[in-house]
Image (cartoon, rainbow, N blue to C red):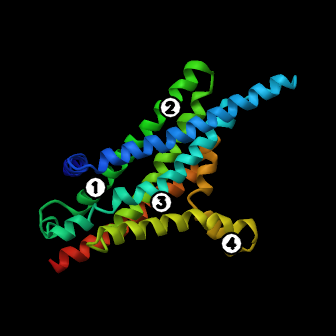
Amino acid sequence: MRNAWIICWKELGSYFVSPVAYLLLTMFGLIFGFFFWNALGIFVIEGMEMQMRGQMFPMNLNEQIIRPLLQNVSVIGLFFIPMITMRLFAEEKRTGTIELLATSPIGDLEIIVGKWLAAVVLYSGLLLFTALNFVFLFKYGNPDWKPLAVGYLGLVLQAGALLAIGTFISTLTKNQIIAGAATFGVCLLLWVLEWVGGYESATWARVLSYMSVITHFESFGRGVLDSKDAIFYLTVIFLGLFFTARSMESLRWRS
C-alpha cells in the first residue's frame, strides 16, 4: 500500500496549496469554539444558581459539556464532509487527469484508499482543532478522559463512513457542486433515518433506524465502545470504497 500513502500525501498537499483546507480549519474551529463557549457558560451559570439555592447536586463535566459537544461536532461534520470529498474525483474528471489515473500502473484500490485516507486525515485535523478547547476543561476541571477518547474514536469512524460515501459520489460526476450537494443529501438522509423509530415500531422502521449513522454514535458519545457500532461504521466504509472501486473500474474500461 506504499502507493496509497503517496496518493494520500499528494492529495493532502492539494488541499493545502489552495485556501480550502485553511478555510475549513478556520470555520470548523470558530463554529465549535462558539458551541464550547456557550456550553461552558451555561454550565457555570447553572452551577452558580444551584449554589445560591443551596443545592449541592454534583456537576458532571462529561455529561453536561463533553457529551453534548461531541454530538454538536457530529452535526457540524454533515456540512464539512461534502466540502472535503466533492473534489476527490470530480476535480480529476473536470481537468481530464482521471484518464491518467485510470490508465496508470497504480491499482484502483490504492488510488481510492489514498484519496479516502487524505480526506480522513484532513477531517481528523479538524477534530484536533476542537480537542484544543477541551484542554481548558482539564486545566480547570477534572473530567474523565476515557469517554472523551472513545467519543473522538466514534467521530473518526462516523466521518470515515460518510467520507467513503462522499468519495463514491465524487466518481459519478465532474461537477464539484453536484458532488457536494449529493453527498450532503445522502449524509443528511443517513442522519434523519433515526427519526422513523420515534413513531413507528414495525420491522422496516427498526431497519431504517438502525441504518442511521447517529444511532451508532450514541454509545460512543456515552464513552462506551460497542463493537456492533464500530462494525457498522467499518461496514459502511467498506461498501463506500467497494462501490467507488466499481465506479473506477468502469472508468478504466472506458479509457
Check if mark 3's residue and mark 4's residue have beta carbons within 8 Å. Answer: no
| Image x and y of residue 74, in percent | 53, 50
Between discs 3 and 4, the one toward the N terminus: 4
Check if mark 1's residue and mark 4's residue have beta carbons within 8 Å. Answer: no
**Residue 31 versus residue 13: which sits nearer the camera?**
31
The residue that label 2 is drawn on is 133
| Image x and y of residue 77, in percent | 47, 52
Q: Is residue 62 in view?
A: no
Tell me how far mark 1 sits from mark 3, CA to CA.
18 Å
Q: Is residue 229 in view?
A: yes
| Residue at x-position 58% and y-position 31% | 146
The residue that label 4 is drawn on is 205
Between discs 1 and 3, the one toward the N terminus: 1
**Residue 238 versus residue 222: which sits nearer the camera?**
222
The residue that label 1 is drawn on is 115
Between discs 3 and 2, the one toward the N terminus: 2
Circle 1 or circle 2, nearest the eye = 2
- The amino acid at mark 2 is Asn
| Image x and y of residue 123, in percent | 39, 47
| Residue at x-position 47% and y-position 37% | 130
- The amino acid at mark 3 is Thr
What numbered label is drawn on residue 235?
3
- The amino acid at mark 4 is Ala
| Residue at x-position 46% and y-position 31% | 132
Circle 1 or circle 3, nearest the eye = 1
How packed mark 4 is, by other alpha carbons closer than 10 Å (few <14, some 14-19, many 20 or more), is some
